[in-house]
Image (cartoon, helix red, strand yellow):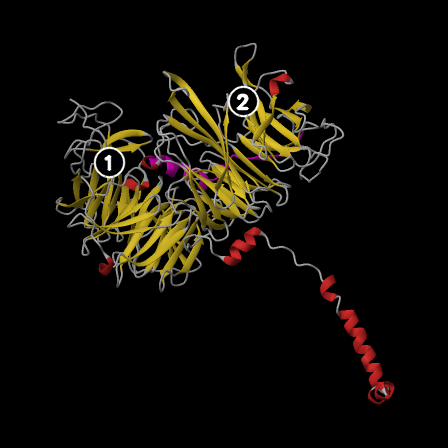
Amino acid sequence: MFAKIMHMNFGPEVFSKVIVCLLLFCLTKPAPAIEAQKPEISLADRIQQENKIHREEFYGDVKLLHAPYPIDVQFSADGSVLFSLAETVRLWRSDTGAYLGSIAGPVRFDDFAQLNNSRWIVTLDDSENVWERGLYSGIPQYLPRLRIWDVITGACLGVRKLEFPGDAKTLSISTIETAEQSQTTYLLLETHLERSKSDEGRQWGWTRCQLLGFQGPSLIPSCQLELEDFQIRLESPKDSLTWDPHTRQLYIFGEYHISCFDPVSKTILRTIVLKDFMNQKKSIDELFVIDQPFHGNTGLPGKNQPTSTILVTFDPSREENLQGREKSTLPQWALIDSLSGKLIKSGVVNTHLKPINKQLKNNKEELIHWLYDDRHYSIKAINLLKNQTLLRIPWIIDDFATRSRYQLTYDDWHLNRDDSRDINQKIAYSQSANRVCIIGGVLEEIFLYDSQTGKRVTPETGMVNDLSPISANKFSGSFDYHDASVFQLKARDQIRRTFNTEVPENSCVAISADAKRIVVGETSGKATVWNLSNHKKLFTLTGVSNELLCIAADTSQNRIVAGDSNGVFWRWNYPTPLKATPEKVQRLIAERNGKQTKSHFPEKRSKEKLTNSLCALSPDGLCSLCFQPIEEKMASPLFSQDGENLLPVPGIALVVKLQNEQKFGEVIATENAKKQTILTPAVHTKSVLIQIKNSTSGRFALFVFNTGQVTIVDSQTGILESIIQTGNREIVDVDFHPDQKTLLVASYRGAVKAWNTDTYLKTGSLQLYDARLNQISSCVAEQGFDLVIGTRDTGLIVKRGVFPKSAQQPERPAALNLPFGGPLPED
């Protein structure tokens, strides 16, 4: 019956079709099993795709700039992300150097380490020691905490408060290290106590050193071991812990020995004393765990224990030669077996050898080590076993942008913290990404290179070096001293770039009041004018031999005004009628803008070069402010001058700092190139002038002092308008709106605050995430103010409608404001 049914339902044609379908099914069914596996997404790509990590919305090309002073760099496990540590931790793509995001805490970070295959990072707060870290003389201002962060979302997963003795004189945490297999964070905590351990009597110099361990994202305490008689390297207390993923031991190294800590038994298994097999007594510089095995390992035979090789490099000491001159010895290194502690091989590095290859290729049979060569200002890839220099990369970058960033840091002396964080020469190498990164140069910046070719991946970009006032809903800005652009404000926090050109070594930019012209000044004294309607170059402005510090265009008067570094203002007049052809750019020659500047001390004027913050113009160029240094060493009617620290004389002279030297001087206000007024407002004896600026209308002069005081003077009448005590010692720029009675104050570390100039109360506050500010421009909006903020390391940031009147909550000072610090000088 069954056969009959089969015969009835499956004829020859149907049966053949069924066979074909079965064959197709059999052939296609295993396809998923043999389908090629999709490549795993890199950490950098995942961060960009999820787009959850914190960062401000910025405009511009931000790459590898991290202010102020990065102190560490590390690559992620897959090499796709470069981490940099300054006061915060920033994430960069290692292939392009592009900015991915930041992790910032309530205080600045001192150290960080990676965990969970670089998915997490562990940070250590800075204790803000008064003196150098690790020298047992730093009194902590904060109790540092450990924090663990998700690098993809930027979320803080856990915080651990560290326990310190209440009677500890000082504390120091030399380093943190992570163990990937156990997800544990280790640190060395040193506390300096006056009282002996037996509490009988007192003794000097007793230091308690503990090894602490914390496990998982919650940082649960898992280890506490007191280290007896452990010597921490006083010269450089960083990197005293190194985790060995092969033997799963933690190496604690001091100046001349290495202790091997077992996390399971929580004991020190052995101590390797290096001077036992090294001829010379040299302190340890760094310790590395080598992934590849080496012939000659002297591990214990017959035991199936994992082993690894330790590479130790030593500090190149300085010795005297026969002539009594100091010379630097060659760097030394040693390979040590991790189990027996015996020496495998040692040698020296000849840094004078020339590179033998143009390209560096990965070779597992070679032991390649990257090191600094201070004598030749470079880093080198050295094959230690053959003592060969494989690749040499110069790390001194001497381009104009780098020099200008350094000069700006030098000029803004009031922003430098009086502390000594470890600014070490750092090298990070990723074999998987073919990248090597260093911290170096005059400004301790981040340089990223291709480790095979030695070529620089990208220059450091992301600084707005100048910003114009907002005119007709447009403004101009210069990026990294070469890119001049015009932007138009759009809805919400959006802007649109309407013009862009390259002007190398530019120093200032301006946009005309009708937003039809952009003017760009240069360090050579030359300037250029473009027509924004057709993007054509109109004029080349010449006749000035010094750097232009500020510039303004007045289209109604057909003229352009600029101030140079000597404090001289120049004028270029448009030809009448205005004729410009695409084939020819007209050349205009400058003439002095008005008569010679008046002064109380015409015979005592100094030739000091001014900075951008001491020379200003109103947007239309009709009103100017300029500081005029004076050679005179005058006496104060109240206090005697003490030499280096000069004291301003009320109504006679102010004090500024130029080229690291304090100078007396006056501020000259000029209106329409004719009327001149000398402005020297009375100020506290410890105040140093750091900025002068015109209000948008040009009527008011703003004086900013290093104590946080902002004095507003009517430059036409010389009458005081207001004095605001901000208490902020990190002011970088101000803006004043007299009709709204509002003073906007921008702070270096990302804060913008609004003050009522009638009530002297703070009415609003805006804190940007991980941005160091440089300038601010603002205009009155329907609700509050529109802010355009130029930063030093995060491009251009726009905030619309901030500080609306409905949201203003005036704040009275919590206590008496004494912004000057310390008593008045004695007679």
The image shows residue 602 at horizontal and vertical percentages of: 19, 32
Q: State the SS at label 2.
A: loop
Q: Amino acid at mark 1?
A: Gln
Label 1: how many residues lie within 10 Å, few (<14), some (14-19) or many (20+)?
A: many
The image shows residue 611 at horizontal and vertical percentages of: 32, 38
Among all residues in the image, which is located at the extreme bottom?
Answer: 8
Q: Where, quadrant-wise, is the C terminus in this rendering?
A: top left
Would you say residue 396 sits in the magenta stretch?
A: yes
Between residues 743 and 669, which one lies in front from this camera angle?
743
Q: Which residue was labeled with disc 1?
A: 628
Would you say residue 322 sits in the magenta stretch?
A: no
Q: Amino acid at mark 2?
A: Glu
Q: State the SS at label 1.
A: strand
Label 2: how many residues lie within 10 Å, few (<14), some (14-19) or many (20+)?
A: many
Between residues 821 and 724, which one lies in front from this camera angle?
821
Between residues 429 and 483, which one lies in front from this camera angle?
429
Which span of residues is magenta-colored? 388-413
Q: Where, quadrant-wise, is the N terminus in this rendering?
A: bottom right
The numbered disc on residue 255 is 2
The image shows residue 302 at horizontal and vertical percentages of: 76, 30
Give left or right: position of 445 versus 699.
Answer: right
Between residues 373 and 505, which one lies in front from this camera angle?
373
Question: Foreground mark, 1 or 2?
Answer: 2
Look at the picture and state if 221 lies above or below 258: below
- Residue 573 in view: no
Give left or right: position of 812 versus 241.
Answer: left
Q: CA distance from mark 1 to mark 2?
A: 54 Å
- Residue 793 in view: yes
